Image (cartoon, grey):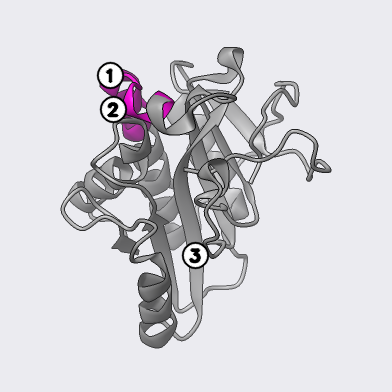
Amino acid sequence: MNLRDKFFQKKPAAYRIHHEDTLASKTLSERLALLLPARRTDSIVIVCIGTDRSTGDALGPLVGTKLQQLKPKATIYGTLESPVHAVNLNEVMESIAEQHPRPFIIGIDACLGRLHSVGIITAGEGPVKPGAGVKKELPEVGDIHLTGIVNVSGFMEYFVLQNTRLNLVMKMADVMAVSLHESIEAYGRDVPIEKHKANWGDDLIQLP
């Protein structure tokens, strides 16, 4: 789980959409396809960060598990069975560096934000910063990121994550997994992607 300090300088706007939007999967997959490298890379690696011991922080492992079932043309790290979390993240990143000479890494994580932003999924350039919300020093992950705001930030983050609704996390994981799978499939087929403009304000505390 990561949390960007609201007093930090803002980075370029990322694409944001609520998971209940009827076009969420379609438009998110199109945005992700645009973020994939124009020149083919040796491998796409998806790192889904989080733990199944916390409902809110299980978003990453849930996405990883759902992606495995869809069998995308990518290597997945982080599932409910084998989560990637604070204890083993450094080891996993070292393993990726050894096994994938030129990987394009997509970082997946849960985050906290403002009340009216709960349920929003964010995709953009740059890495996720796992552990920042709970003041842990962990390596940044990803050439691009995909995150989901699962609950409200500002007070007792560990407690908030433990008391996040599983229903919300499951629905967000469904949208994220399908979008990732479709974007990677389109990328492999060289399907032209139509650009869509986002119309959401920059109202998130967390923008990795």
What is the magenta range? 160-174
Q: Is there CB contact under 8 Å for labels 3 and 2?
A: no
Mark 3, Cα crowd under 10 Å, few <14 / some 14-19 / many 20+, is many
Residue receiving disc 2: 170
Q: CA distance from mark 3 to mark 2?
A: 23 Å
Q: Secondary structure at mark 1?
A: helix
Mark 1, Cα crowd under 10 Å, few <14 / some 14-19 / many 20+, is few
Residue for point 51% across, 19% down:
118
Q: CA distance from mark 3 to mark 1?
A: 28 Å
Residue receiving disc 1: 167
130 or 185, nearer to the observer: 130
Residue for point 41% across, 80% down:
94
60 or 27, nearer to the observer: 60
Q: Is there CB contact under 8 Å for labels 1 and 2?
A: yes
Q: Amino acid at mark 1?
A: Asn
Secondary structure predominantly adopted by residues drawn in magenta: helix
Please provide percent x and percent y for residue 129. 57, 53
Q: Secondary structure at mark 2?
A: helix
Position of 70 relative to 94 (above/below): above
Q: Is residue 208 left or right of residue 65?
A: right
Residue receiving disc 3: 105
Q: Is residue 94 left or right of residue 39?
A: left
Mark 3 vs 1, N-terminal side: 3
Quarter of image, res 52: top left
Residue for point 29% across, 36% down:
54
Q: Amino acid at mark 3?
A: Ile
- In the current view of this chain or complex, which residue is farthest to the front? 156
